[in-house]
Image: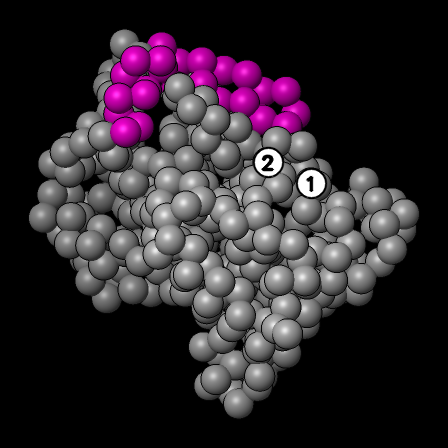
Amino acid sequence: MKIAVLGAGSIGCYVAGCLLASDPTLSAANALTLIGRQRLYDDITANGLKVTDWQGREQLTKPEHIAFSIENDSLVDADVILLCVKSQDTEQAAAIINQHAKQSAVVVSLQNGVGNAHLLRQHIKQCVIAGMVPFNVFYKGNGHFHCGTEGNIALEDPNNQCSDIIKALNNASLPVTVYNDMKAVQYGKLIMNLNNAVNALSGIPLKSQLGDRQYRLVMAKVLSEALAVLKAEGIAPARTGKVIPKLMPKIMKLPNFLFNVVASSTLKIDPEARSSMYEDLALGRRTEIDYLNGEIVRLGEKNHIATPVNKHIVNLIKQHEVAQKGSPHLPANALLLK
């Protein structure tokens, strides 16, 4: 089995690093290729690929054992393509797959958002597997990727087409849960991802942000709007971790001492963890806001339900994308409409 990671950013590099560290034959046979940007190519070819996590994982694959390419034609031999590009780049990725990948390849979408697998199926002939990555990965520089939260990778594999890659992921201590229908799971992840923008705008680590009740009160409003529009759509977001989605607004409103009790048993977050959207602002990149909070705004408009807090947060993120000055380090009250 030859694996290619297309769009090797934080998630893609972390998953690839775990796979390489767990199975040296992947590098010995040149069976895993990362395809990504020049910046990460330079870092990883100089420093190797180091993966760590909140539970104490620490693994390093040396540069000479890593195949990293900036050329898309490296897809040509891939049996499995782990697609990790941002949602706004899905159509472009589909064109790349059409041009370079063999039709027998299986494409596994490990992307944020809820519509990427459907969009891929409209544009490519390869088998597409919907997936979801629940954990957060932050790039610390010099080839070091740190996973700061917990959770199992979710895959939709009703026809058992991913048994080999599932086995490889499980062996790499990246446990996989298989679902027959990913829609509810993806919306469950979307609910969790609505905090990405709040974290990016706050500019502080996730654990510190969630430890501040004022930011949690913002999140309670964000989540309440989201649950209202999903209910109107007839969507019941699945529980993807230890927290039941419909209870999250109530949990966010708890005073600190009670929240800390709940969080200690349900939310395992590394003190260093930050959202990927924080990293996007720091690097002056376009974010996935339209596919996260923007999805809630879209569904609200469709169902004639007001989503003022989500809309305000979308606008704030877009303002700071344009400014390209990183996180604005906004206080919680600035995330609410005056």
Provide the residue span drawn in magenta: 39-62
The secondary structure type at the circle numbered 1 is helix
- Apparent side of residue 210 relative to residue 101 in the rendered image (left or right): right
- Say the numbered circle drawn on residue 207: 1
Pick whichever, 163 or 315, lies toward us: 315
The secondary structure type at the circle numbered 2 is loop
Q: Measure the alpha-carbon separation of dots 2 and 1.
A: 7 Å
- Say the numbered circle drawn on residue 289: none
Amino acid tagged 1: Lys
* Residue for point 58% across, 77% down: 308
Pick whichever, 57 or 275, lies toward us: 275
Disc 2 residue crowd, few under 14, some 14–19, many 20+, Cα 10 Å: many
Amino acid tagged 2: Ala
- Apparent side of residue 279 relative to residue 63 in the rendered image (left or right): right
Residue 241 point in image, percent of width and height = 66, 49
Residue 163 point in image, percent of width and height = 41, 39
Is 153 covered by the magenta stretch? no
Report whether residue 257 is seen: yes
Q: Do tag 2 and tag 1 residues touch (Cβ < 8 Å)?
A: yes
Please say if 135 is above or below 338: above
Residue 235 point in image, percent of width and height = 57, 74
* Residue for point 49% across, 62% down: 316
Disc 1 residue crowd, few under 14, some 14–19, many 20+, Cα 10 Å: some
Residue most extreme to the right = 257
- Apparent side of residue 258 relative to residue 56 in the rendered image (left or right): right
Q: Which residue is mark 2?
A: 273
Report whether residue 161 is seen: no
* Residue for point 55% across, 52% down: 201
Residue 206 point in image, percent of width and height = 64, 43
Pick whichever, 149 or 330, lies toward us: 330
Please say if 162 is above or below 305: above
